[in-house]
Image (cartoon, rainbow, N blue to C red):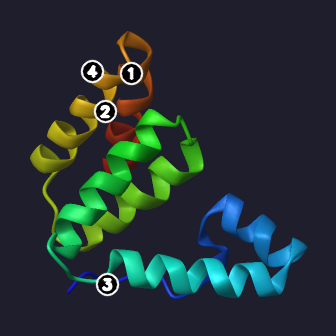
Amino acid sequence: MIERETNVNYIVPVRFLAAANKDALHSFTGLHSAIMSEGALSSKEKLLITLACTVAVKCESCIEKHTEEALKNGITMEEILEATSVAGLTCGGSGFAFASAVLEVAK
């Protein structure tokens, strides 16, 4: 089972939502839990997809926090680099610039 951050203020967009609308935040965290729980895909696979998506949408604070979460949960740097390389490829060359952010977090 993937260990998740229990403090909702760990990602900038979530911190904003916590300040702007507590009801929406509650709904968002419930949706997050439901989607990220074990299912046809493992929590590990879902976390790698999440990390790749954060690269694709170019969310630097998300890349940092999801990389930290992946490493904390035993996902290897090799797995992280492969997943984020797919995102970089999907986005074209500019995606690789954001994919490289995982290297900074892993230092």
Say which quarter of the image contains residue 81: top left
Q: Earlier in the sequence, mark 2 or mark 3?
A: 3
Marks 2/3: CA–CA distance? 24 Å
Q: Look at label 1 and name its amino acid.
A: Cys
Helix, strand or loop at label 3? It is loop
Q: Earlier in the sequence, mark 4 or mark 3?
A: 3
Helix, strand or loop at label 4? It is helix
Q: Would you name the residue on which mark 3 appears?
A: 3
Mark 3 or 1, closer to the camera: 1
Tell me whether the residue at label 3 lies in contact with that at label 1, contact meaning CB atoms closer than 8 angstroms: no
Q: Would you name the residue on which mark 4 appears?
A: 89
Q: Estimate the x, y position of residue 36 in percent, counting from the top left.
A: 35, 75
Tell me whether the residue at label 1 lies in contact with that at label 2, contact meaning CB atoms closer than 8 angstroms: yes
Q: Residue 29 vs residue 13: left or right? A: left
Helix, strand or loop at label 1? It is loop
Q: Look at label 2 and name its amino acid.
A: Ala
Marks 4/3: CA–CA distance? 29 Å
Is the residue marked by circle 3 packed among few (<14), some (14-19), or many (20+) residues within 10 Å? few
In the displayed structure, 87 sits above or below 18; it is above
- Could you tell me if residue 86 is visible in this image? yes
Q: Would you name the residue on which mark 2 appears?
A: 87
